[in-house]
Amino acid sequence: MRKKSSSAKPTNRIMDPGSFLSDHSRSFDAFRYVYPVVSRRSAGLSVGVNVNPNKVCSFSCRYCQVDRGSPAALARVDLDLLFDEVDALLDLAQSGRIFSHPRFEHTPEEWKRLNDVAFSGDGEPTSYPLLGEAISGVQNILDERGAGHVKTIVLTNGTRLGDAEVRARLEVLAARPYEIWVKLDAGTQTYFETISGKKLALDRIVDGIATLARTLEVTIQCLVPTLHGSDPGDDEIVAIADRVRFIANQGGRVKLVQLHTTARRPAHPEIGRVSDDRLECIGQLLRTRLDMPVAIYPGRDWE
Ligand code: SF4
């Protein structure tokens, strides 16, 4: 049974302006760790959970929209308060009251539904040592609220999946409906270092993804931006497809490949979005190389 926090509770006061699709702000009302998002990808409402308020991440993606130039608002996670916030935001979502908020009032009727709870946020969720406890606690809240059918999603950049302890944090997901979205933006070591901003070994990261995927089904998330006006090119896309095939050939279960481009203002101005037509071509190229579904999510200008 989760404990009730003695900390200040979030209120159900609704005051943030903005449109429901363009505003993916992680700041909503008085909440510190949770935020609501309506997106085309979920075709409904996703409750985001940020277990990295300190903004620590093992990548430094060129397209990241997290502002690491400003100090983090919170240094650590208060798990009891996080659970209280999840409960309060789910209450807003399940009652439908959230859709009277100015940010969500234009949500299409068919999207006025709770789709998932997603561990995402300002860094790498698997780096949070209590991630397993956080997942279990959220799943219990969903059960208590009669929403045990709602899936829990964890987004990860994949850097730590070679670590058995980290994989164990994710294994609790299997108790309920779940998805794991693993970032894979590059197929070659050179482009990987360019786009991730880190000199880590891509081979080892892909090995870690394959190891996890042998136990837990994964969705591969591939974000393709332009860099100084150019996308990574067909050879890089083929190399990404080869990496995904490697994961599948290792016995990994890959449910889906999600192909994205940028849709939010990145930290670096040299990053742009791939046009809808070009993204469709890239998606078709992936489909010719992979024996699995590829979903294409067009970007959006942020000016
Ligand atoms: S992995 Fe995510 S949070 Fe980390 S730098 Fe990349 S986009 Fe930002």
Image (cartoon, helix red, strand yellow):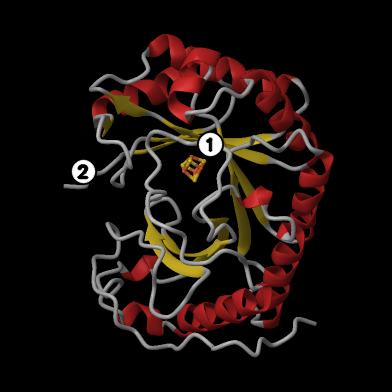
Residue drawn at point x = 72 percent, y = 37 percent: 161
- Image coordinates of residue 108 in percent, x first then y, are 30, 67
Q: CA distance from mark 1 to mark 2?
A: 24 Å
Residue drawn at point x = 54 percent, y = 49 percent: 123
Image height of 271 relative to 69, above or below: above
Name the residue beneath numbered marker 2.
Answer: 301
Q: 231 and 129: which one is in front?
A: 129
- Image coordinates of residue 48 in percent, x first then y, are 51, 63
Residue drawn at point x = 58 percent, y = 15 percent: 242
* Label 1 C-beta lies within 8 Å of the nearest ligand 1 atom: yes
Name the residue beneath numbered marker 1.
Answer: 59
What SS does tag 2 mark?
loop
- Image coordinates of residue 55 in percent, x first then y, are 51, 53
Neighbours of disc 1 within 10 Å: few (<14), some (14-19), many (20+): some
- The answer to whether 60 appears left or right of 217 in the picture is left
- The answer to whether 22 appears left or right of 202 in the picture is left
**Dot 1 or dot 2, earlier in sequence:** 1
Residue found farthest to the left:
303
Where residue 226 sits, quadrant-wise, is top left
